[in-house]
Image (tube, grey):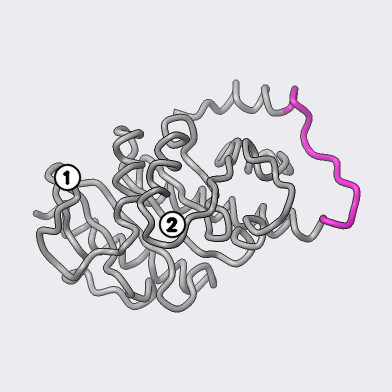
Amino acid sequence: MGAEADLREEIVELGQMLARLGLSHGSTGNISVQLDDGWLLTPTNSRLGKLDPARIAKLDDKGCHLSGDKPSKEAFLHRCVYEMRPHDRAVVHLHSTHSVAVSCLDGLDDKNCMPPLTAYYVMRVGKLPLVPYFPPGDERLATAVRRLAAHHASVLLANHGPVVAGKSLDSAAGSIEELEATAKLFLMLQDKPIRPLTPDDVDELDARFPKS
């Protein structure tokens, strides 16, 4: 139980950090982490900056609610990512402003929403596929995410926001922060000619820093 208690505190600390950085407004966004006997998920309608560790929802491996407050209505998103990425231990989903803005742009490449602007974006995120729009809570969204999650730790939900998996809460958080920062750069450069990294640059980074 000690490990679970520690993870509950880590979720609270991450929620506070994301709120402090302006990456979670109102009751948007949710965080989960895998346990040996299920997983933890932030409650529905909760503010990430004001989480109570004791009230974080606990679910079993099948997604059934065991304890704590009612889990986020987007629990199915987290579950389908874990099913396709069994070695990842955490998922962060945000409605962060710049990433959502990118997700609303017309003409995005649905196989890779943003160009490789920086080495750190390539290292932390890589290719970012676009998931078609579905209403919040619509489980068709899980089917669409499931198709991509086996090959991509990060996806962008159209008109919604990013979902990022990682080996740990810190890893998932670092990747989603990098994604948001790159989305901001991408929007800032919309009316300017850009010089992204070349395919050879990307291949070299992938060879030097392989994604597990």
Measuring 67% from the left and 52% from the top, which residue is drawn there?
182
Vertical relation: 170 (above or below) 15 = above
The answer to whether 171 appears left or right of 108 in the picture is left
The numbered mark at residue 79 is none
Is residue 198 covered in magenta? yes
Please state the extent of the stretch shown in magenta in the rendering.
190-201
Vertical relation: 121 (above or below) 23 = above
Q: Position of residue 16 (x, y in %)?
A: 40, 71
Is residue 202 covered in magenta? no
The kind of residue on which mark 2 rests is: His
- Residue named by callout 1: 62
Q: Main secondary structure of the magenta part?
A: loop
* Classed neighbour count for the residue bearing mark 2: other residues with Cα under 10 Å, few (<14), some (14–19), many (≥20): many
Q: Position of residue 145 (x, y in %)?
A: 44, 42
Q: Position of residue 27 (x, y in %)?
A: 40, 75
Please tell me which residue lies in front, 57 or 22. 57
Measuring 75% from the left and 22% from the top, which residue is drawn there?
200
* Classed neighbour count for the residue bearing mark 1: other residues with Cα under 10 Å, few (<14), some (14–19), many (≥20): few
Q: Position of residue 38 (x, y in %)?
A: 16, 47
SS class of the residue under badge 1? Answer: loop
SS class of the residue under badge 2? Answer: strand
- Residue named by callout 2: 93
Measuring 24% from the left and 74% from the top, which residue is drawn there?
52
Which mark is first along the chain, 1 or 2? 1
